Image (cartoon, grey):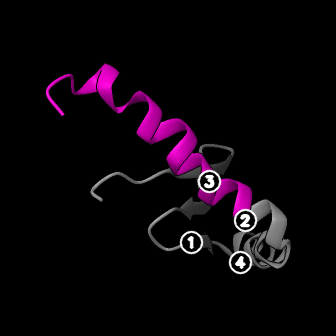
């Protein structure tokens, strides 16, 4: 619901692309990042795996961070 999985790609301390489970795809923030995001988004099995990380990683560990939930 309110949980999201974010995977960022950095080069030289600059974030050039980010995957957000709420958006469901990579978004590029630089010219290179846009190219990489398009490449990564074209691989549907890779994107499906990242979407599954929200359930496998975030949902699984939510009790460790918020024990009352």
| Position of residue 8 in the picture relative to residue 6 (left or right) | right
Of callouts 1 and 2, which one flags the residue occurring earlier in the amino acid sequence? Answer: 1
SS under mark 3: helix
Who comes first in sequence, dot 3 or dot 2? 2
**In the picture shown, does residue 28 fall above or below 10?**
below
Q: Is residue 59 visible?
A: yes
Residue 26: percent from the left, percent from the top? 64, 69
> Which callout, 4 or 2, points at the residue further toward the start of the chain?
4
Whether tag 1 and tag 2 are in contact, CB under 8 A, the answer is yes
Tell me the crowding category of disc 3: few under 14, some 14 to 19, or many 20 or more residues within 10 angstroms, Cα based: some
* Helix, strand or loop status at disc 1: loop
Measured from the top left, where is residue 3 in percent x and y? Answer: 34, 51
- Depth check: give the residue in front, 34 or 52: 52
Is 51 displayed left or right of 45 in the figure? left
Residues in magenta?
48-69
In this view, 20 is above or below 30? above
Instruction: Say if the magenta span includes residue 37.
Output: no
Of pointers 4 and 3, the one earlier in the residue sequence: 4
Give the alpha-carbon distance from disc 1 to disc 4, as whole Å: 15 Å
Task: Look at the image and tell me in which quarter the C terminus lies.
Answer: top left
**Mark 1, mark 3: which one is toward the viewer?**
3
| Residue that mark 4 sits on | 34
Q: Nearer the viewer, mark 4 or mark 2?
A: 2
Dominant SS of magenta comes to helix
Q: Quadrant of the N terminus?
A: bottom left
**Dot placed on the residue nearer the N-terminal end, 1 or 3:** 1
The residue where tag 1 is placed is 24
Q: Which mark is residue 52?
A: 3
Q: Which residue is mark 2?
A: 47
């Amino acid at each position: 619901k309110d949980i999201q999985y974010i995977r960022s790609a950095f080069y030289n301390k600059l974030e050039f692309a980010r995957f957000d489970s709420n958006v469901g795809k990579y978004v590029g923030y630089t010219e290179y990042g846009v190219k990489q995001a398009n490449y990564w988004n074209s691989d549907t099995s890779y994107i499906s795996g990242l979407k599954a990380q929200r359930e496998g990683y975030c949902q699984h560990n939510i009790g460790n961070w918020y024990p009352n939930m």
